Image: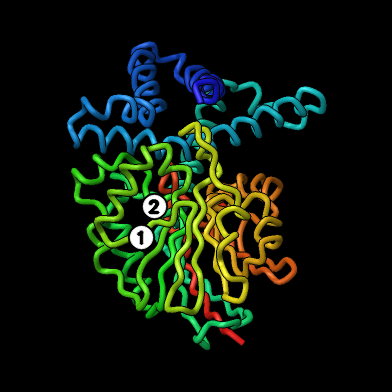
Amino acid sequence: MALFFIIFLTVYTSLNFYVFIRGWQVISAYPILKSVYAILFIIIAYGYVIAKVLYKYLHPIAYDVILGVGAIWFAFLAYFLLSLLFIDIVRLFNSWFHFIPSYITNNYEFAKKVTAIIVITIVGLIVFLGNLNKRNIDVRELEITIPKGDGKLDELNIVMASDIHLSPIDGERLLVKIVDKMNSLNPDIILLAGDIVDDKASVLDERNIGESFRKLKSKYGVYSINGNHEFINGVDSCVRYAEKFGIKFLRDGYELIDSSFYVIGREDSSMPQFTGKPRKSLEEIVKDIPSNYPKILLDHTPFKLEQAEQNKMDLQLSGHTHHGQIWPANLITQMIYEVSWGYKKKGNTHYYVSSGAGTWGPPVRTGSRSEIVNIKMKFE
């Protein structure tokens, strides 16, 4: 993990330096602004990292502000990089074909300032609209039919969410919306596919974030698994934090519900990185489950989908991808994952990968929509 963070900080610093230098060039005619610009840029660019490292020493208000500013910067950084890259490509082509009018090239300083204003305005608008988009949580409906086997139910109303990512950035305000939407769907069972948290359990407890979980209502209860962010923030403390709200965790285990179907939960594939312990194979987890009952699998990261099919799962529910969250990252997740978002069927196994109800990092969505998934399952 140390190597990962070294690589991340090296790349992140390089990208920020590129943006910093271009901003420095714009204000070069105003020496009085340079020191202020440099200090503010460093605080904003590294705010998220500073808050995470110094969370024990910062006042809660200072922590929340620095964390929030640092998080929103990730979205600004992404679109500043894309804008500057586009400008540099245009300048390169202009050096070859000279298509930019001379009255612009002859007034370089003025053109530089106007371009900066345009870029800042457009990027600011994109981030603002992305924040508005993130606040709207869609309900995706899916109807599937699976074999009844020895179960006694004819139908099941599942409400599923993933990647809520609770933190002081959105906190209880986001959770209230999610809980209200879930309850409005009258679920028989609520399934959470990992990444409930995006901060330390102690930070969330201190702010009473999570209390709305107590209002969730369903016939068979609320079941969850751990995602990579539970492991990042201390998996055991995160599980204890969520369990006090009535959420039951399946940690490489399973539970028979109403003598009719099994819910199986896997630890996230990142588990070995954070604990040094391997997660159980799916084959090992389900070896004692009778084959003639319907089986629903929760597995946070949608890698190796064939494992669910090979072990005769009827439905796999996953998250993690956010379907990119920030455009054009959704184009990348589509290349990485067999299913970046949505429904797929392989053999007799149904799959749904959610784009998530919350957001990681910046509270911004420009490449996907936030969602809760309502699955109407029929048994035949």
Instruction: Give how far across and how far down residue 42 sits, in percent.
Output: 39, 21
Q: Nearer the viewer, residue 274 or 228?
A: 274
Labels in figure, total: 2
Q: Name which residue type carries label 1.
A: Lys
User: Which sits earlier in the primary sequence, circle 1 or circle 2?
Assistant: 2
Disc marking residue 57 = none
- Residue at image position (38%, 44%) is 198
- Residue at image position (37%, 80%) is 186
Viewed as shown, does residue 378 lie left or right of 98? Answer: left
Instruction: Give how far across and how far down residue 243 sits, in percent.
Output: 29, 55
Q: Name which residue type carries label 2.
A: Ile
- Residue at image position (48%, 64%) is 371
Q: Residues within 10 Å of mark 2 (few under 14, many from 20)?
A: many
From where the camera sits, is residue 366 visible? no
Pick out the residue farthest to the front. 288
- Residue at image position (61%, 64%) is 342
| Contact between labelled residues 2 and 1, with CB atoms less than 8 Å apart | no
Q: Quadrant of the C terminus?
A: bottom right
Q: Is residue 209 above or below residue 199?
A: below
* Alpha carbons under labels 1 and 2: distance apart: 12 Å
Q: Nearer the viewer, residue 125 or 29?
A: 125
Instruction: Give how far across and how far down residue 125 sits, in percent.
Output: 46, 47
Q: Nearer the viewer, residue 207 or 106?
A: 207
Viewed as shown, does residue 161 lie left or right of 103? Answer: left
Residue beneath disc 2: 196
Instruction: Give how far across and how far down residue 310 sits, in percent.
Output: 71, 60
Disc 1 is placed on an element classified as: strand
Residue beneath disc 1: 248
